[in-house]
Image: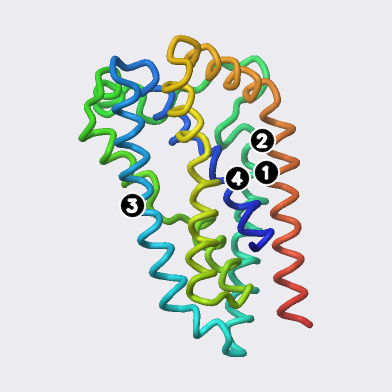
Amino acid sequence: MSPEAIALGVLSAVRATPLAIVYAFLAGQQPRRLLTAYVIAGLVVSLVVGIAIVTVLGASTRAPASSTTRDVVDIIVGIGALSYTAGFWSGRIGNRPEGEPRRRMPFEDGRLGRRLRSPSWPLAAGLGAVTNLPGLFYLAGLVAILGTDPTPVNGVVQVVIYNILRFATPFAALGLVLARPDATRSVVESLQDWTRRNSRLLIVLVFGGLGIYLTVKGLVGLLG
């Protein structure tokens, strides 16, 4: 399994919008049903796209030009991670300077925010599909998997493992709902409080470290 894909899968597990949606589902009247619909729909989209890319492009990754493509993707993702780190630290992205009130979720006051206060399972399934469409980090994870020159079977296995990591948060929330439904909300609230208190350090260490690593790795590959 590609170490880069593992790291990107873990990072994808703490995306802000899916976390907010999962928390909203936990406050609903049927959290088990909502989370199940969200996870199934999201996994279908994510797995179909990931497996298709890895199986179709797997043979072409052995071409000499493919290494240049992977290096370019590494640089793009690395710069993106560093830009996010800088924006978060400055308060322009997902954060706030000290003394300012907490920012609301982008959809909290809109139509979607109102529907999330009494969500239905079709809405949960739709959100699972839409919020788990491949983004930059997902494509970078697939490029990292292709960089291992996998066989078709090995490539599919790596995509499945990557998606298990990517869906770790809704998986954990669903597991808590099934095992300890009365304690799930308090556990998630405690986790959110801890993450909020340590977010600046976590973002700098994780996104900043990953951004430096991928940028340097891509530049070394291009110039080497």
Q: Are marks 2 and 1 in contact (CB under 8 Å)?
A: yes
Return the disc, 2 or 3, that comes first in the chain's sequence: 3
Residue 203 pos. (x, y %): 68, 38
Which circle, 2 or 4, is nearer the viewer? 4
User: Measuring 65% from the left and 51% from the top, which residue is drawn there?
Assistant: 7
Q: Secondary structure at mark 4?
A: helix
- The residue type indicated by label 1 comes to Ala
The local crowd at label 3, few if under 14, some if 14 to 19, many if 20 or more residues have their Cα within 10 Å, is some
Callout in the foreground (1, 3): 3
For the residue pair 196 and 61, the one nearer the viewer reads as 61
Query: In the figure, 55 relative to 161: above or below?
Result: below
Q: Residue at x 67, y 43 (%)?
A: 86
Residue type at numbered disc 3: Val
The label shown at residue 86 is 1
State the scheme by which the image is colored: rainbow
Q: Are marks 4 and 3 in contact (CB under 8 Å)?
A: no
Quarter of the image for the C terminus: give it: bottom right
Residue that mark 2 sits on = 90
Q: Is residue 165 above or below residue 211?
A: above
